[in-house]
Amino acid sequence: MVKVTVWNEYRHERKNPVVREIYPNGIHGAIAGFLTEAGFEARTATLDEPEHGLTDEVLNDTEVLIWWGHLAHEEVKDEVVQKVKRRVLDGMGLIVLHSGHFSKIFKELMGTGCDLKWREADEKERLWVVAPGHPIAEGIGEYIELEKEEMYGEFFDIPAPDELVFTSWFEGGEVFRSGCAYTRGNGKVFYFRPGHETYPTYHHKDIQRVLVNAVKWARSVARRRPVYGNVKPLEPIKVKA
């Protein structure tokens, strides 16, 4: 059973009644709920918990970390970001959602500003599957259509993805790289664009299916980690005259 931690800053739900109505148990609670139904062992963590809920014990027991943040990126402590980064490089999967593109951990792993265009106009989003053979797209048709979402537009200031799984088109005309897969060290990272807090995006069955697939894809690989640093030779080295 894959062990998943769903992290959310949990601010919108407590400040905005519209968000609270859509996600009465928080965005983290909604995501953890359908992941549990899918057979994963899902726990949650939030910004205002000690160590943001990401203690060494929690991180060491997490195979895949899901991250949703927006209002309070700068409140995330740098030492926690570095702990998460070390775990990703050691093999923990990381799935970054929506406005998490500006999170400290995503920018740290990407090495770029991760900026983009945006607009809130209740417009249609169509996420086209551009890698139909990718495991994250399993069970999804040619596209996912969301009746209303926030627009994100190019240029998206990220490194070129190792694999691009989804590209979005918006009613206003913009396009966006919405499903970006990376390898960082021994770990896998997936950025998935949809999920603005005032829309019921995480109740959409296809969006849930993508996240279930992404957890399976990003899970830790059971193998011995590479050895770094100074090592002894595998074979005798003959001294040359």
Image: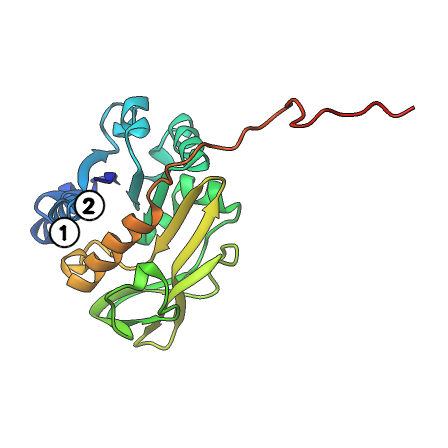
The part of the image, by quadrant, that contains residue 149 is bottom left
**From the viewer's perspective, is 199 left or right of 179?**
left
Q: Nearer the viewer, residue 38 or 211?
A: 38
Q: Which residue is mark 2?
A: 12
Q: Where residue 98 appears, x then y in whole percent?
A: 31, 54
Q: Which residue is mark 1?
A: 19
Q: Is residue 207 visible?
A: yes
Could you tell me which secondary element the residue under label 1 belongs to? helix
Q: Where residue 34 appears, x then y in whole percent?
A: 13, 50
User: How many C-alpha atoms fall within 10 Å of the one at disc 2: few (<14), some, or many (≥20)?
Assistant: some
Instruction: Tell me, yes or no, whether the two marked residues, 1 and 2, touch with CB atoms within 8 Å.
Output: yes
User: How many C-alpha atoms fall within 10 Å of the one at disc 1: few (<14), some, or many (≥20)?
Assistant: many
Kind of residue sitting beneath label 2: His
Q: Where residue 183 appears, x then y in whole percent?
A: 47, 48
Pick the quarter of the image with the N terminus.
top left
Sequence-wise, the earlier of marks 1 and 2 is 2
Kind of residue sitting beneath label 1: Val
Residue 123 position (above or below residue 61) = below
Residue 3 position (above or below residue 135) = above
Q: Where residue 44 appears, x then y in whole percent?
A: 19, 36
Q: Is residue 124 visible?
A: no
Q: In the displayed image of the protein, which residue is found farthest to the right?
A: 241
Could you tell me which secondary element the residue under label 2 belongs to? helix
Which residue is at 14% across, 41% downward?
14
Which residue is at 26% across, 58% downward?
210
Pick the quarter of the image with the C terminus.
top right
- CA distance separating discs 1 and 2: 6 Å
